[in-house]
Image (cartoon, rainbow, N blue to C red):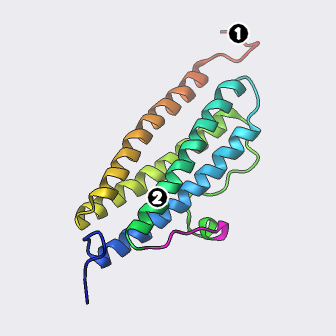
């Protein structure tokens, strides 16, 4: 019985990677849907800036959903594909009826923290398995999302320093 899959990786390690990627996939789907909801429901002074940023982010999440699902298939696994699967598997929970910009950005920062943590775990697993494809994917995602954390955190800090309209300095 062969111990290697079609791309030359150990089958048992590939199975573990596919399982971890499915958990990541579920979190990406929850992040996508949450960010889509933020895009639709955002209100207030920063509407125009955040509406566009949230659209950029959910479009990016959707691309990653497809890439992660295809990586699972490449490793010989089956990607999760129902809302029940995502809801039951994801660490990221639904964000509902958030219209405040700061609360929305804080939600995104929480999600990015979870995604980065899972991707770091997958990076270690894929290194142990000699899986350069998953290593490259996770490394790219981590680098990109670390920058997003910095940018969204900077946005929140700027908002917290601004005096409220109608208040004395």
Q: Give the range drawn in magenta.
A: 77-84
Is residue 130 left or right of 49 when viewed as pictured?
left
Residue at (30, 76) in percent of width and height: 5
The image quarter containing residue 98 is top right
**Element class at badge 1:** loop
Q: Position of residue 92 (x, y in %)?
A: 57, 57
Mark 1 or mark 2: which comes first in sequence? 2
Dots 1, 2 in contact, CB < 8 A: no
The image quarter containing residue 159 is top right
Q: Where is residue 68 in the image (x, y as percent from the top left)?
A: 46, 58
Residue at (47, 37) in percent of width and height: 149
| Quarter placement of the N terminus | bottom left
Give neighbour class at mark 1: few <14, some 14-19, many 20+ (Cα, 10 Å). Answer: few
Residue 71 among those drawn in magenta: no
| Quarter placement of the C terminus | top right
- Residue matched to label 1: 168
Residue 91 visible within the image? no
Is residue 14 left or right of 31 when viewed as pictured?
left
How far is the residue under mark 1 from the one under mark 2? 50 Å
Residue at (66, 51) in percent of width and height: 33
Residue at (36, 45) in percent of width and height: 140
Q: Residue 35 carries which label?
A: none
Between 1 and 85, the one nearer to me in the picture: 1
| Position of 23 relative to 116 (above/below) | below
Residue found farthest to the bottom: 1
Q: Position of residue 81 (x, y in %)?
A: 59, 67
Residue 4 visible within the image? yes
- Residue matched to label 2: 68
| Position of 63 relative to 155 (above/below) | below
**Element class at badge 2:** helix
Q: Position of residue 151 (x, y in %)?
A: 48, 30
Give neighbour class at mark 2: few <14, some 14-19, many 20+ (Cα, 10 Å). Answer: many
């Amino acid at each position: 019985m062969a111990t290697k899959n079609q791309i030359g990786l150990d089958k048992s390690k590939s199975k573990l990677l596919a399982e971890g990627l499915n958990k990541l996939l579920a979190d990406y789907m929850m992040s996508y849907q949450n960010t889509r909801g933020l895009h639709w429901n955002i209100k207030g002074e920063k509407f125009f800036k955040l509406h566009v940023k949230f659209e950029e982010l959910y479009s990016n999440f959707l691309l990653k959903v497809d890439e992660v699902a295809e990586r699972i298939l490449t490793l010989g696994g089956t990607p999760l594909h129902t809302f029940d699967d995502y809801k039951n598997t994801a660490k990221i929970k639904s964000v509902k009826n958030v219209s405040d910009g700061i609360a929305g950005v804080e939600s995104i920062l929480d999600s990015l923290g979870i995604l980065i943590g899972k991707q770091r775990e997958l990076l270690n697993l894929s290194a142990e398995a000699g899986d350069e494809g998953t290593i490259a994917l996770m490394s790219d995602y981590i680098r990109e999302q670390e920058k997003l954390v910095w940018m969204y955190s900077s946005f929140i800090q700027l908002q917290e320093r601004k005096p409220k309209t109608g208040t004395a300095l």
